[in-house]
Image: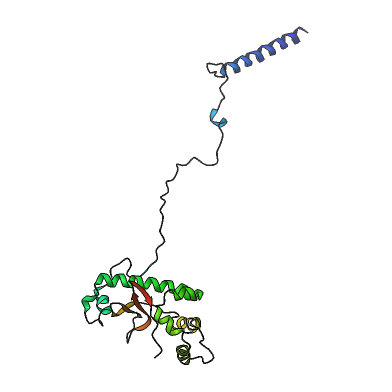
Amino acid sequence: MKKNIFFILITLTVVFSISLSSCASKPQDNSGTTVPDNPVNDLPVTDTLPQEPVETDYSYDEDVVEVLGADEELSDDEYMRSIAALDDSKSVSKKEFEDDKHRILEIISDLAIIMETKDTLAWLKYIDEPSQEYYKNPVNLRKAQRKLPNKLIELKTIQDYFYYVFIPARKNSHIDEIRYVSKTHVKAVQVREDSDAIYYEFKKENGKWLIYLPPVA
């Protein structure tokens, strides 16, 4: 019996000593709060490291309509070809030539859209008055009709002329240069090796270039 009591006392003494040793090994801060063994492991974990913001260079591109001669100086050779038929070559300066070509190519670009939509009223705004009067005349429309390869087509109005003559004659055309007949009369042409293909003629009225439709030959 005495041995059992002595053994229990020894066991309690050892347990008490171990407990004191464990408490003494825990470091404490000044407030008496126990500091965790590995504070890093208690921090929140994120999937990726934070990145510095990337600066983006924002630029705004203006819509630009590319027209030959609008942004670059046209060559002297082209200028001389354009005024070759004039009696007085000095009647059109190079600056006037550049301005005229720029405006004429703008009109042709507008006409391309109008022909695509077949907007007769919009087309007539670009046609000079004498040409409109000529092709509103039934006699002249019959003359134009006889020139058509398709003999089944009838031209009864200027709208018919627009649909069946003007548009087909300029389909897939490409304008390279202009040729002055006079200071106020210009032909827009596609340059070819043998001869120029004439697709448009313009006449200037009150400072404004308008389409001129030649009479039926």
**Residue 4 horizontal/vertical position (percent):** 75, 10
Colour convention? rainbow
Q: Nearer the viewer, residue 56 or 44?
A: 56
Image side of residue 134 versus residue 43, left or right:
left
Image side of residue 78 versus residue 24, left or right:
left
**Residue 161 horizontal/vertical position (percent):** 48, 83
**Vertical placement of 140 versus 184: above or below?**
below
- Using the rendered view, name the quadrant where residue 187 is placed: bottom left
Q: Nearer the viewer, residue 161 or 40?
A: 161
Q: Nearer the viewer, residue 202 or 110?
A: 202
Q: Quadrant of the N terminus?
A: top right
Image side of residue 134 versus residue 72, left or right:
right
Q: Outermost residue, top direction?
A: 2
**Residue at screen point 41% across, 55% down:** 60
**Residue 70 horizontal/vertical position (percent):** 33, 67
Image side of residue 51 versus residue 198, left or right:
right
**Vertical placement of 26 versus 137: above or below?**
above
**Residue 12 horizontal/vertical position (percent):** 69, 12
**Residue at screen point 54% across, 28% down:** 39
**Residue at screen point 25% across, 72% down:** 94
Q: Nearer the viewer, residue 130 or 63?
A: 130
Q: Quadrant of the C terminus?
A: bottom left
How many discs mark residues in the rendered view? 0
